[in-house]
Amino acid sequence: MLTGPKNFLDISYDELEELNLEAKSKLLNRVNSDTLQEEYVRYLSDKKEIKAVTVAFTDLEGRFHMLDYDKKFLLNSYDNLTFDGSSVRGFSIQRESDLRLMIDWGSFRWLPADVFGPGKVMVFGLIAALDGSLYESDLRGQLKQLTTDFWTKDNSAANVAVELEGFLFNGRNAEQSYRSSTGFEFVSSGGYYHSLPQDPLRQFIDRFAEAQRALGFENEKDHPEVAPSQFELNFSYSDVLVCADQIQLYKLMARQIADKMGMTASFLPKPVPDINGSGMHTNMSISRNGKNIFYDAQGQDKISEYAWSFVDRILNNANDLCLILNPSVNAYRRLDPHYEAPNQIKSSAIDRSSMVRIPLGNEKSARIEVRSVAPDANPYLLLYTLFKTGIEGPMAETLDSETRRTRTRFLPDNIYDAMRHFKGSEYLRSLLGENNHGKYLELKQAVAERCPKLLGTRIKTDEILFHHEVTNQYLWGKF
């Protein structure tokens, strides 16, 4: 048995942070993609300690997929990578299964070896059809194109930060082994700010924050949330595509770090009844030539008419959007009017039950906060749809904006009503394309049909086992 040393890349967290912040800076400063490709290809060629490159992509529902390519193979074949799209639920059908996987070199990231394994770096992929055109069901590609169009048109940039909550449960694979008769087991019974410095939840948060910092997230604060065993780690406002990528990495790292500690990180919206659920409050603004155009010192709640128009369009289309913002059976438990649920289709600067909140801000920080977003939403589909809707979504002509912002209406409280609104929306059919619209609805229908129709007060086994983020392909294959 060979036991000699392996010369694989394993660098310190401080150096990782420097490298990843530099890479992020190049992306935000819009360094030419050909320049970045040349730089990173040269780096991979020179760096002997790298054994593999992880290429990541996201399917229509938001599941994160990763392929590890041998570095030498990738350097010779990065312009001709293909994969079987028919094996990914919601992608291509079998008779047209081959898809191209292109490298988005601007997303190059160095990985913490203790989380991802030594000798690896990561890039995000862009999916194309065999003819080279952008694949319609790759919403990351659609979002990237949207940001390019923004910048090309008038030097506009879409900016986002999220507040992404999750739960930490005892035992590995707690979701896959879930039974409604026993539920989940908390690792901590403390609440908001109450965890002891060395309890399991705090140890998890500390390790997670270190890895997040090393990946260049630019951490802001981390803490236990209101519910027992609940956590939230905030990172800085950034470009919309960067933020969406970081959401996927956030959930991946949380799951991996928890697994190494013998626990499960879960992003189910409401995994335990009678306590607060988890959300992903989504803070959004648009800047033009570096200036925040959502800010107006004289405007209502100090945001501009442009920002209010953005809010009004989201509120006007709220029911149609609900299935994208809340894509699972379990998500509709979170829209319960108790526990600070943001289920009212209105905006407010103070009322946290409103779908859209207007946080206190200045010229730098003025933004809107969409609160009715579940943590299991596909971040690329979510942000693409919200920005497109806020800018050009249809507006009702029969209501004045003031009434629309303050009158009390409610989001659907079950997935069937959400699917009905989504199915009947000609706007979303046009925005997403007939094919994506139909495929997404079919995927949601498949999950709903495997779960009891009435939610009741107990978290049902099937709504967990058939949740799109719970990795259980063997079980799906039995139906």
Image (tube, grey):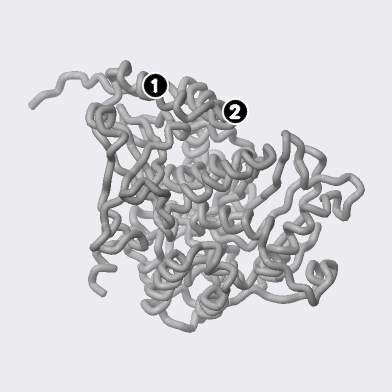
What residue is shown at x 36% (from left), y 54% (from top)? 171
Looking at the figure, which quarter contains the N terminus?
Answer: top left
Q: Secondary structure at mark 2?
A: loop
Query: For mark 1, does the 10 Å Cα neighbourhood hold few (<14), some (14 to 19), or many (20 or more) residues?
Result: some
Residue 241 picture quarter: top right
Is residue 181 in view? no
178 on left or right of 145? left
- Which sits earlier in the primary sequence, circle 1 or circle 2? 1
Disc 2 packing (10 Å; few <14; some 14–19; many ≥20): few
For the point 74% across and 48% down, the residue is 367
Residue hosting label 1: 11
Query: CB atoms at circles 1 and 2 under 8 Å apart?
Result: no
Q: Position of residue 361 (x, y in %)?
A: 80, 44
Q: Give amino acid for label 1.
A: Ile
Q: Going 88% across and 51% down the picture, which residue do you hit? A: 299
What's the mark number on residue 473? none
Please indicate whether residue 408 sits to the left or right of residue 374 in the image.
right
Answer with the quarter of the image where residue 7 lies. top left
Residue 77, x across and y down, in percent: 26, 33
Q: Work out how far the residue at label 1 is from the one at label 2, CA to CA, in angstroms.
A: 26 Å
Residue 231 in view in this figure: yes
Q: Is residue 189 above or below residue 117?
A: below
Q: Nearer the viewer, residue 244 or 474?
A: 244
Q: Position of residue 323 (x, y in %)?
A: 54, 69
The type of residue carrying mark 2 is: Asn
Q: Residue at x 41, y 68 (%)?
A: 439
Residue labelled with disc 2? 29
